[in-house]
Image: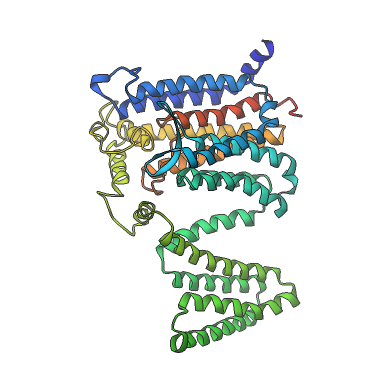
Amino acid sequence: MDRSNNIWNRIDKISLILFLLLIVMGWVNIYAAVYNEEHSGLLDMSQRYGKQFIWIAASLVIAIFIVIIDNRFYFFFSWFIYGACMLLLILVIIVGKEINGAKSWFELGGFSLQPSEMAKFGTALALAGYLNTKRQELTQFSVILPASAIILFPALLTALQPDMGSSIVYFSLFIVLFREGMSPYIFFSGLLMAVLFFLTLLTNNLYLTIALIGISVFLVWFATRKWKLVFLGTVIFVFIAVILYLLDHYVFKSIGNELVIFISLILSGIVYAIYIYNKRAVSVLIIYLFLVCSTIFINSVDYTFNNFLPTHQKDRINILLGLKSDPHGTGYNVNQSIISIGSGGFHGKGFLQGTQTKFKFVPKQSSDFIFCTIGEEWGFLGSGIVIGIYLFLLLRLIKLAERQRSDFSRIYGYSVVSILFTHIFLNIGMAIGLVPVIGIPLPFLSYGGSSLWGFTILLFIFLRLDASRTEYLI
């Protein structure tokens, strides 16, 4: 009993208070989002706010249970938890209930469970367990590849449901790899891929490829300061490209401009290879590989986007990028969300006074678009307070992560921060039209038992580890 009391005394009170504040705010705003005058009681179990109270009460029980368990349990059973979560992700694809075109839920009587929400803390535990022993070797691909596989496996299984929103969240764990010593070149290459993805959709592939070639030429000059080398390489590339273009135009008539440029890059690269080998010009090799890989990437993105992505997801991305307008169809949710938030003004319309909310203009306003209710009824001031609370919580968790003596606890702590930050950024960005609608909840505020329980477990495992930071895990 003394040990149990001591653990509760060492739980970070600031994080605990912020957690309680957020779930109460969520409950109140869910009440406002689905308010029914005929069922005005907060504990009316026929309404979503009544059911959310059950989820909140259950999450508090789960939090207590997590704190009571010995902290070494999460260390020694991290791989078992990860394996169980992966098994659930596989099973849900096979026997899960299909809702809105996705098999992401287990239906147990009147209760639904979304395993992808639980798999996030399981993946964070497994990643922490692996990096705990390999942290000093994150500069080696033999370590980076298994760590990446731990992250990408649940992301792939979730994408197969398909649930692209939750799948994207797993990629946030690469931030942890960067924090633990992964080369910044690899990390920023990932960010560059994201930029190229959107540029591919916004511009013509041919023009984008030419722009990349121009950038690469400049980088080679900047790295070597040999303008004759750059000029010679450019002449060789242009000469090969012209010959291939003329052959395609008059003989083959089927290659296409993009493929002509790509083949020209490969052939001219053979000439460059002689210089790279003789001069050991690693920087030139890196720039050349960057150009070739970027060219392959932008063409694969274009092909995948047009041939594999579901129509509704393509429409959402095109609307976000301004390539398509559909305010009464695919873009309806975002359009109404922006109107709802904007109508709140500085201080909002007041509790239960939101017209967009009252007349149900925004679908899923108690779950994915809960931020609309905050924006309309509490205005810019209330929205700023909510974002401020989230920011305070994230900064607090970073501080807790940095004070850990155990590598396992610190790595897990940064995993928690990365997952929470990604959810917050994407959900609020989705509500104000900055990112496509991908259907992910706002932590601790959105309606739903699976998400609330998943975030509670994610957070309180770390708070439990932090409470025992002076103890040895092994």
- Which residue sits at x=65%, y=75%? 225
**Residue 299: where, in percent of width, then height?**
49, 67
Front-lying residue, 450 or 379: 450
- Let me know if residue 468 appears in the view: yes
The percent coordinates of residue 287 (x first, y second) are: 62, 68
Q: How many marks?
A: 0
**At 54% across and 70% down in the image, what residue appears?**
215
The image quadrant where one finds the C terminus is top right
- Is 366 located above or below residue 244 in the figure? above
Q: Is residue 74 left or right of residue 459?
A: right
Which image quarter: residue 250?
Answer: bottom left
Lateral position of residue 11 relative to residue 391, left or right: right
Q: Is residue 195 left or right of residue 123?
A: left
Extreme residue toward the front, this view: 95
Q: Nearer the viewer, residue 350 or 290?
A: 290
Q: Nearer the viewer, residue 374 or 242?
A: 242
Query: For the point 41% across and 45% down, which residue is it?
Result: 438
Residue 85 is situated, as x and y percent measured from the top left of the image, at: 57, 36
User: Residue 199 appears at what percent x and percent y?
Assistant: 45, 62
The residue sitting at the top extreme is: 1
Can I make out residue 178 in this image?
A: no
